Amino acid sequence: MKKVLIAICAVLALFMTGCGTKEKNIEGTLEDIMTKVYEGISEEELPMMLSNVEVTKENEENFLGTTDLDFKEALASESMVGSIAHSVVLVRMNEDADIEKAKETIKEKANPRKWICVEASNVYVESKGDLIILIMSDEKADTLKTNFENLK
C-alpha cells in the first residue's frame, strides 16, 4: 500500500510540474510577423522612410549590439533617416539556443543612442517561443510591444 501511494504521489508531482512545456513558436515569415507587429499604426504615424533590412552575422552588431547570438534568421525595421530613433528587430533563434540568455545579452548590449543626436525613450526585449523582439522607439513602442505579445 505504501509503494502504491508513493507511486501515485510521483505521478501527480509530474503532472503538476509539467513536462517542460515550451511556448508555441510563431509561424510565418519574419516579414509577415513584422507586418503584424505594426498593425493598427497608420502610415502617417510611422517613422519616415521605414524599411526592413535582413540582419546577418556581418551586421548583427549594428542592430542588436552584439555578435554573440545563436540565431537562425533576423529582420530589422528601421527608419532610413538617421535622426529618427526607431528600431524593431525580430530574431528567430536556433532550436537549441538559450532564449533567456539571448534576451539578457540583447538588453545589456543594445544601444538606444545609436542614432545621430537622438535616443529611443523606450526599450523592450520580449520573446514568444523561438522569436525575440527588440523594440527601441518612442511613442509607438507600447503599441508594438502589445501587438507582439498578442501574436499567435
Image (cartoon, grey):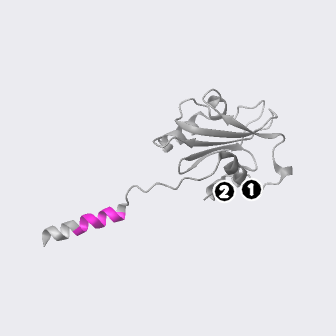
Residue displayed at 77% across by 35% down? 118
- Mark 1, residue position: 39
For marks 1 and 2, the one nearer the N-term is: 1
> Against 139, is 86 above or below?
above
Circle 1 packing at 10 Å, graded few (<14), some (14-19), many (20+), is: few
Q: Quadrant of the C terminus?
A: bottom right
Q: Quadrant of the N terminus?
A: bottom left
Residue displayed at 56% across by 36% down? 108
Residue displayed at 66% across by 52% down? 145
Q: Secondary structure at mark 2?
A: helix
- Mark 2, residue position: 146
Type of amino acid at the residue the image marks with label 2: Thr
* Residue 18 locus on image (x, y percent): 38, 60
Residue 10 highlighted magenta (yes or no): yes
Quadrant housing residue 119: top right
> Against 87, is 149 above or below?
below
Judge by depth and name the residue closer to the eye, 110 or 60. 60
> Against 18, is 144 above or below?
above
* Residue 76 locus on image (x, y percent): 69, 39
What number is the disc on residue 47?
none
From the image, give the main secondary structure of the stretch colored magenta: helix
The residue segment tinted magenta is 8-16
* Residue most extreme to the top: 58
Question: Real-space Cα distance between discs 1 and 2?
Answer: 10 Å
Judge by depth and name the residue closer to the eye, 6 or 120. 6
**Labels 1 and 2 touching (C-beta < 8 A):** no
